[in-house]
């Protein structure tokens, strides 16, 4: 694409500003003044609009392409949710914290309060804080709550247990909170080995962090037993909500024994995801952990007025400014009330159906390490294609040329040449069939013409990168 500076013509202008009627400010110190012009591109308004519009068309998004990024749940963001968020745009997040400010934003506080009640019901928790700004931030908040709980009881706890298939943020969050990590391997049936888990447990374990269904897309049939074992040692169960989209409305984590839950609103309730933000990771807890939740808390008095509560001396304090990423919360709130209970159940059922459809269609062409009914995502291996010198990343690059965002590759780490596919609930059979056809084409091409995959992508502005060099020598690139 031609750079905007290459379109520059001396003297060309996109806008003419009126003469300033603002009194001149005192002159800046000499050392802060430019010694030469800024060198901005001189282009017309139309050139500028076309340039940035064409740049935007280079992006992959759920609005433009099938986006089967496993473990991340790239849900379609309904436009009605965007409209709902704009209704609250005029309110500054500090309003409720100012003296008397609460009376001016009862609607905003009420929305957050109601959302917390709904998320508590969906997850089987007793109370929810909306403060955490992302899933990993929610994890960190949850582990700090667990740590505060044990300290208040004088419990000497040292370890956090995680499966070897866990998201990397699980052990990272626990380590930051001061715990040592005990990793339990995956059994041949695709879930954390129950017997090795028993051996890993002790009175020094503070918590067990799990995703259920796990990153292989499998629901652990022993999850209730695992929770009971953990509780017998005085440990708490932490639910990583990354895969809640698979069981929403069907199973409440709190009902099977989890004590703390974080919810990725972007992965479950139709809010934006990607690009480094925005995000939201509300955390729900069972009754015993309520005293430690972040403050201020939103409560409702006897007259139905929403008030801020700061009277919990055992609170871990603020997890974030204000009450979380407010615009994301509005979207999630609208999503939940728009679908209702039956709609949320249908979301989960359709997501599971779609993932199993893709799994069955692609089984003849890719290795399936754990061949059983999956939940919202399925994990293949490109080990068969590796015999022809083709890696999972080569298949990913081939998909880019065909107009598809690649699935997640090389995760979970326990699967060699992993390809994790998650279609979500909104993709039609026709859209999935088209994607499946390209995946089959990639598998066949790996055997007949592997170089075609090794050379991909050929149709993008940026071709094949040296992945290692790109990771080690990062540079900021600006087409503007």
Image (cartoon, helix red, strand yellow):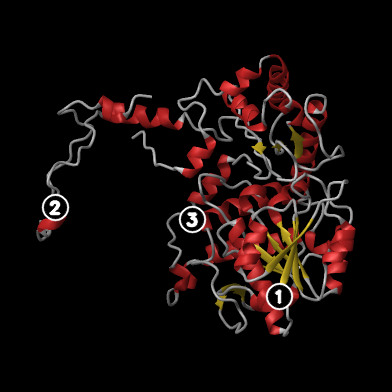
Residue receiving disc 2: 33
**1 or 3: tag closer to the N-terminus:** 3
Between tags 1 and 3, which lies in front? 1
Mark 2 burial class by Cα count in 10 Å: few <14, some 14-19, many 20+: few
- From where the camera sits, is residue 368 visible? yes
- Residue 400: percent from left, percent from top: 58, 27
**3 or 2: tag closer to the N-terminus:** 2
Quarter of the C terminus within the rendering: top left
* Picture quadrant where residue 144 is located: bottom right
Q: What element carries label 3?
A: loop
Residue receiving disc 1: 289
- From where the camera sits, is residue 23 visible? no
Specify the label residue 88 is tagged with. 3
Q: What element carries label 1?
A: helix
Give the alpha-carbon distance from disc 3 to disc 2, as whole Å.
40 Å
Give the alpha-carbon distance from disc 1 to disc 2, as whole Å.
56 Å
- Work out whether 108 lies above or below 276: below
């Amino acid at each position: 694409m031609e750079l905007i500076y290459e379109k520059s013509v001396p003297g060309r202008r996109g806008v003419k500003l009126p003469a300033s009627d603002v009194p001149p400010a005192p002159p800046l110190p000499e050392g802060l003044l430019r010694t030469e012009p800024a060198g901005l591109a001189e282009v017309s308004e139309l050139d500028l609009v076309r340039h940035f519009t064409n740049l935007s068309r280079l992006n992959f998004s759920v609005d433009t392409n099938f986006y089967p990024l496993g473990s991340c749940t790239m849900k379609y963001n309904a436009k009605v949710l965007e409209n709902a968020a704009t209704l609250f745009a005029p309110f500054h997040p500090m309003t409720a914290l100012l003296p008397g400010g609460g009376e001016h934003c009862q609607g905003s506080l009420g929305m957050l309060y109601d959302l917390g009640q709904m998320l508590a019901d969906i997850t089987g928790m007793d109370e929810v804080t909306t403060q955490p700004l992302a899933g990993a931030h929610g994890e960190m908040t949850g582990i700090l709550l667990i740590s505060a709980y044990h300290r208040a009881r004088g419990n000497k706890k040292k370890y956090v247990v995680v499966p070897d298939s866990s998201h990397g943020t699980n052990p990272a969050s626990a380590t930051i909170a001061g715990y040592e990590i005990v990793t339990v391997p995956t059994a041949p049936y695709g879930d954390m080995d129950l017997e090795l888990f028993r051996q890993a447990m002790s009175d020094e374990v503070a918590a067990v962090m799990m995703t259920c269904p796990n990153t292989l897309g499998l629901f652990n049939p022993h999850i209730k037993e695992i929770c009971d074992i953990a509780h017998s040692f005085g440990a708490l169960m932490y639910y990583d909500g990354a895969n809640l989209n698979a069981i929403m409305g069907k199973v409440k984590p709190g009902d099977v024994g989890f004590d703390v839950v974080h919810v990725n609103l972007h992965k479950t309730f139709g809010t934006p995801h990607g690009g480094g933000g925005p995000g939201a990771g509300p955390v729900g807890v069972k009754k015993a952990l309520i005293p430690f939740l972040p403050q201020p808390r939103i409560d409702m008095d006897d007259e139905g007025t929403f008030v801020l509560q700061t009277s919990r001396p055992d609170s871990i304090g603020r997890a974030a400014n204000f009450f979380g990423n407010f615009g994301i919360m509005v979207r999630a709130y609208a999503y939940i009330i728009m679908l209702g209970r039956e709609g949320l159940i249908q979301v989960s059922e359709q997501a599971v159906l779609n993932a199993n459809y893709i799994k069955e269609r692609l089984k003849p062409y890719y290795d399936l390490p754990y061949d059983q009914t999956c939940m919202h995502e399925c994990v293949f291996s490109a080990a068969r294609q590796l015999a022809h010198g083709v890696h999972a990343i080569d298949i990913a690059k081939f998909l880019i040329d065909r107009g598809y965002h690649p699935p997640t590759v090389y995760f979970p780490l326990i699967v060699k040449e992993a390809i994790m596919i998650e279609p979500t609930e909104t993709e039609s059979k026709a859209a999935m069939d088209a994607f499946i056809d390209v995946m089959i084409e990639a598998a066949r091409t790996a055997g007949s013409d592997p170089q075609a995959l090794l050379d991909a992508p050929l149709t993008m502005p940026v071709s094949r990168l040296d992945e290692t060099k790109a990771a080690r020598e990062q540079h900021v690139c600006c087409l503007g």
